[in-house]
Image: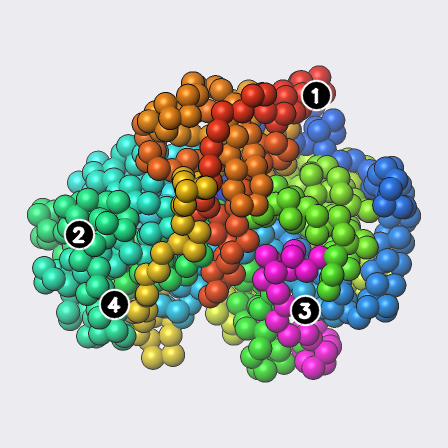
Amino acid sequence: MDALPAVTRTHCPYCALQCGMELHAETGTPLRVAGWNGFGVNRGALCQKGATSTELLNPAVRLTTPLLRSHRSAELEPATWDEALDFTADRLSAIGAGHGRDAVGVFGGGGLTHEKAYSLGKFARVVLQTPHIDYNGRFCMSAAAAASQRAFGVDRGLPFPLADVAHTDVILLVGSNLADTMPPALRYFTAQRENGGRLIVVDPRRTRTAEQADLHLQPVPGTDAALAAGLLHVLIAEHLIDEAFIAARTTGFQEARAEAQRWWPERVEAVCGVPAGEVRAAARMFAGVSAGAEDKAENPYGTSGMVLTARGTEQQADGADAVNAWINVALAAGKAGRPYCGYGAITGQGNGQGGREHGQKADQLPGYRKITDPAAREHVAAVWGVPADSLPGPGRPAVELLASCGTDIRALLVAGSNPVVSAPDAEFVTSRLRALEFLAVCDVVLSETAALADVVFPVTQWAEETGTVTNLEGRVLLRRQAVAPPEAVRSDLDVLGALASRLGRPGFLTSPAEVFSELAQASAGGVADYSGLSHERLDATSEGPGLHWPCPTPDHPGTPRMFLDAFGTPDGLARFVAVACEPAIEEPCAEYPYRLTTGRVLAQYQSGAQTRRVRALNAAEPGPFVQLHPDLAAVLAVAEGDAVRVTSRRGSAVAAARISDLIRPDTVFMPFHWAGAGRANSLTRRTTDPVSGMPAFKTAAVRLEAALVETAQVETARAETARVEAAQ
């Protein structure tokens, strides 16, 4: 391998902002992180997670050798690579032979590079020949993806650069707390307000992001579709719709209009808890009434506007419909397909977009092709050198896939995911993983899921490998290797290649550049066309800004802004979707009188498998908590820091009380980053959106009571912090 440079420009391993960073390798000192000022998305800014990301490279806090459990009752023990690979191949082969190829499943992650995600999909369909592959991105972006496909014919998180936010007159931000989840992105919203723009935030909690809003709507969790329908009702009733845009560039308005007629503001108030006056004010503000921006020379269309959604509105049992209801608002106001206008979904995971574009999702092949499309199957099969009829059909979405473990699915390969903590109804999921005949996990750390495995493969992480990702804007980026991995650590690509050889499919590509080249061929002509991209081209772009897909030829400049001329539907028109706004399936009752909603905090990330191993992040947020209103705390007779037991129909969790008047009195909030007694997903539902397969993380009926003992999870967090400190 060539010598690595002293300073490497690369990208953060965490969220989909993919902040640019510089890694400084100096002899005898740990790798040092600095912001990369030349990368325009974050312009040198890093959050605390990015700034401490190199601590995960410490051998004391990560896996450095394969682990093997020869019997389910035995402990995981160090093994050689040949022992781990041979055992895995033997078990996968035997289970496939004995129970059929569909008895083997694959579960991936939204943090995997394109090369890994693509190879995982190819491995499932060509080597294992199983339809059952899905990934944890199903928990993140699936509702927005399905809604965007229905409305625009294309799903790309933001169909415009994030920088456009700063120049938009009015933004409707739904279900996102960017101040905690993507702090460097907040600068664009601050600039938007400094430029005279206005911000509407929809969130049941008054978060740090909501504090910046001109108007904050606090709906009952799970009622977003009704709230959006109420805004559409006001736009129609007060003649604030853009009739010319609707006629020229959309279809389906009359059906959506008829549904919206049922949701006058007073009815919305009764269902959503948002005052009727605020519903009217939000609609008027979004339409640009009294915005003072109609004559801006840079926008000849009048006031510009965006609707941006995130997990708060998407992780519901009607997630796709809820997102389409918000898209309807944007379309009716004529705020789409124009400069500084449009709908966008704020992607969460580092490569959540690329993970589904290139074959990690149960119903898709590379290039965002549908696996049921005969032409798509022929094209991809030709690239893979296999007959099209050998490719399996659609598999089961993530929640169904995990629920099938131990019954229909007897063996599972997991890469870059920790469903024991991140999946809904997590205790049930844990029981299903324990019921498997064989579980293999590829991960950087010994996560709670890896601890259940029969084989654990220690794999390289972001700074130890080169690969590509797509950020929330559809910008394809090259992450560059900065350091060599520990001696006994290999790439996921090497693991898949070695397993493929043992299972009778030699020649599986393991070079990231070669894998990406094949991916580009497989994506050619698809919706997400990467065929004009390569590692070399991405490496050569000035200051490394990346290129936005679609990028179909080597001389194509990429597509920063989509839909300015036509939408991605066959006729080029955007679709209104008539949304029937139904109440949440699990409403509060006498036994479970409160609503639980879940989410993230600033200092931790996703299942916490990585961030809970970083000393500074644990110090900032050491354990789980329950945010509740002072009125509810008084009813429970609990004080700040007291242990509270939260119980749903699925299980219980215990965490410390965090009392705040910034949340609705009928709602409690728990972050989902911890395992053990404080695991929030012990409470959440496996109920899924029928359109997208998105689980209903944001709405669960619960009861609360003071707990007599301190949560064991706090003790676990303290012990883990002490272990990390000792290691460092």
Secondary structure under the numbered disc 1 in the rendered image: helix
Q: What x and y, as percent, mark residue 377? A: 62, 78
The residue carrying mark 4 is 259
Is 310 on the left or on the right of 500, as rendered? left
Location of the N terminus (image quadrant):
top right
Location of the C terminus (image quadrant):
top right
Q: Nearer the viewer, residue 481 or 257?
A: 257
Three-letter amino acid code of the residue under disc 4: Glu
Instruction: Tell me which segment is drawn in magenta.
Output: 382-405
Q: How far is disc 2 from disc 4 in space, using C-alphas? A: 16 Å
From this view, report whether residue 58 is shown above or below residue 526: above
Q: What x and y, as percent, mark residue 208? A: 34, 31
Image-quadrant location for residue 571: bottom left
The residue carrying mark 1 is 723
Q: How far is disc 1 from disc 4 in space, using C-alphas? A: 57 Å
The residue carrying mark 3 is 131
Q: What x and y, as percent, mark residue 373? A: 56, 79
